[in-house]
Each structure stands twice: as C-alpha cells, then as structure tokens.
C-alpha cells in the first residue's frame, strides 16, 4: 500500500553552514510520527514535473510531537534540482512529505558502546537521537560520535554534540576534516576521513554497534574496514545518501 502523502508548510529556512540549509516543515495535525534516525521523502514541483528526494529527520520525535514540525538539513549541490528548489522556496510554501522510512534507529537493547559516524548532513539522524543518546549515556553506555566534513566551515550541529560530550566523561565527539590543513586537537579535530579514526578506537564487535550515515563512498570504506575487524551485519547499521537518477 502506498504511504499517505502529508501536506506540510515550510515554516523556516536556516543556513547551517556555507553549503547546508535547514528547513522546518509543519504538519496540519499530529498524525505523523517517526523514530529518531528515520528519513522522509519530500515531493516538490520543478519545471512542471513532480520530483522526490529523501532527507533524514534532524529533530527528535518528542520535539515533533509537541510542535508538529520536522527539521531536515540539505547539503546544497551545485545544479541539484532539489537544492535549487529549496534554496528558492519561500516560507509559507507547501510540500508533500511521505514516510517515515528507514531502519537507522537505536535498538531496544543497547550495546556497551555506540559508535555513530556521519559525513556532513549524515549527522542529522544523530541530532534527532540526542534525547535518547543522553538517556543512554546516563545509563552508562559509552558513545563515540564522529563527524566528517571537508572544511571546518562545513560543520553542522557541532555545539549540540560537543555539549552532550561535555556532560558525560564516557561520551566523545571528534571531527575529521578531510581538506583542512590545520586541525585543532584542543577542539577534538583530526585530519583525514572519519574511517581513518577507526584504528584509534579499539573497535570490537563484542562490545560496539556502529552506525554509518551519509556519503556512500565513506560507508563502503567503513563497512570494508569493520568487516575486516570481524563486525557482522548485525553490528553495523547504515543509511547511504545515494543520489537520485
Ligand atoms: C535515504 C536517504 C536519505 C538522505 N538524506 C539526506 C539528508 O538528510 N540531507 C541531504 O543533504 N541529502 C540527503 N540525501 C540525498 C538527497 O536525497 C539528494 O540526493 C540530494 O539532496 C541531491 O539532490 P538534488 O536534487 O539537489 O541533486 P540532483 O538534481 O539529484 O543531482 C544533480 C547532480 O549532482 C550530483 N549529485 C547529487 N548529489 C550529490 C552529492 N551529494 N555530492 C556530489 N554530487 C551529487 C548528481 O549525480 C547529479 O549529477 C539522502 C538520500 C537518501 C537515499
């Protein structure tokens, strides 16, 4: 059965970084619900055609329940059709949203450590999980959160993950800068790709559950690395941001 399409109103647009736009959409009623880590399909009209693109929900289910709003974070692609449409969209415009979709959600039984890896807007699902991550940390689960971006000015949601890490000694948040010459180690910045950090984390399939989200090349490399470290499919959860054809 096809999923219902919800009519939503664009209620705000926020530039999160040079190339990332956050959009907030409001639902007409409270029938839409989701689990942190899931994504939606957004429909839009462009040059007379109806197109769809998938985006992770970036705010928590509890925020959505109280406000009837979801946030999405869009990495703007030069000549991208959704990128153009959302850049030009005015607050007050209406869109169709279907979903929620996806399985990048926290399990009921948490492991000893969660390793959450995202590139760019691939951090959005972890932002949606923040209340659950806080609870997990309070219950003693170790968290290692890794954000990969090209440059420092591409980072998003840094303050929120830094704040979580600052409240719990067993939560860490590192940023990997693949094209920045001078990472600041005092700010937990490292050079290179996120998957280059894996060898420093003492990863173990007996203790860790790995979440991977964002750039498909990062996910392929990370899965190869983790498989060689004896992680099976039950110890890796992933959401690949593949392009539409
Ligand atoms: C499950 C899922 C969840 C997703 N969640 C998000 C999300 O939360 N945030 C987000 O920003 N995107 C997300 N994406 C990707 C998103 O759906 C679009 O593909 C993306 O926004 C580009 O759409 P566009 O219409 O602007 O570009 P298109 O018009 O589709 O593409 C224009 C050109 O750019 C190329 N291109 C497209 N994307 C990229 C890219 N990332 N890097 C380099 N070249 C590219 C295409 O090959 C094409 O040549 C997700 C994808 C999936 C499958």
Image (cartoon, helix red, strand yellow):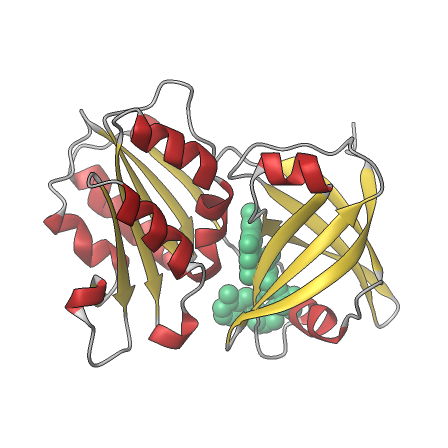
Query: Residue 202 is drawn in which quadrant?
Result: top left
In the rendered view, does 113 fall on the left or right side of 28?
left
> Which quadrant of the structure image shows residue 81?
bottom right
Q: Residue furthest top?
A: 109
Which residue is depicted at the point 60% across and 34% down?
62
The percent position of residue 85, horizontal first and vertical second, equals 74, 70
Q: Is residue 97 visible?
A: yes
Tell me if 217 is positioned left or right of 166 in this view.
Answer: right
123 to 136, vertically: above or below: below
132 relative to 92 in the view: left or right: left
For this view, does 211 lie left or right of residue 131?
left
- Residue 75 drawn at (x, y percent): 54, 66
Q: Quadrant of the C terminus?
A: bottom right
On the rendered image, what quadrant is the N terminus found in? top right
Residue at x 38%, y 35% (from the top left corner): 134
Q: Residue at x 60, y 52 (%)?
A: 55
Ligand 1 found in image quarter: bottom right
Q: Quadrant of residue 35?
A: top right
Residue 226 lies, in percent from the top left, at 22, 41
Q: How many numbered dots are placed on residues in this image?
A: 0
Near-viewer residue (23 or 53) = 23
Given the current orientation, which residue lies at the most extreme right position?
48
What percent of the width, then of the height, locates residue 238? 41, 41
- Give above or below for 92 relative to 219: below
Residue situated in front as seen by the camera: 204 or 71: 71
From what the image shows, is residue 90 above or below residue 199?
A: below
In this rendering, does residue 151 appear at all?
A: no
Q: Residue at x 52, y 74 (%)?
A: 19
């Amino acid at each position: 059965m096809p999923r219902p399409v919800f009519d939503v109103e664009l209620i705000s647009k926020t530039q999160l970084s040079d190339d990332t736009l956050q959009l907030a959409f409001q639902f007409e009623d409270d029938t839409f619900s989701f689990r942190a880590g899931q994504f939606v399909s957004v429909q839009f009209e462009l040059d007379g055609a109806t197109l769809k693109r998938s985006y992770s929900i970036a705010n928590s289910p509890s925020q959505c329940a109280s406000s009837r709003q979801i946030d999405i974070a869009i990495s703007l692609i030069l000549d991208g059709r959704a990128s153009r449409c959302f850049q030009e969209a005015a607050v007050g415009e209406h869109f169709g949203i279907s979903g929620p979709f996806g399985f990048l959600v926290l399990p009921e039984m948490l492991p000893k450590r969660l390793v959450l890896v995202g590139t760019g807007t691939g951090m959005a699902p972890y932002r949606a999980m923040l209340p659950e991550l806080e609870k997990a940390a309070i219950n003693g689960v170790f968290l290692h959160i890794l954000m990969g971006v090209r440059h420092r000015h591409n980072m998003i949601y840094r303050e929120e993950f830094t704040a979580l890490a600052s409240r719990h000694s067993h939560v860490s948040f590192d940023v990997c800068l693949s094209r920045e010459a001078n990472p600041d180690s005092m700010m937990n910045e490292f050079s290179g790709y996120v998957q280059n950090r894996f060898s420093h984390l003492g990863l173990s399939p007996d203790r860790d559950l790995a979440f991977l989200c964002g750039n498909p090349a990062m996910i392929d490399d990370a899965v190869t690395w983790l498989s060689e470290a004896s992680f099976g499919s039950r110890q890796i959860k992933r959401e690949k941001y593949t392009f539409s054809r």
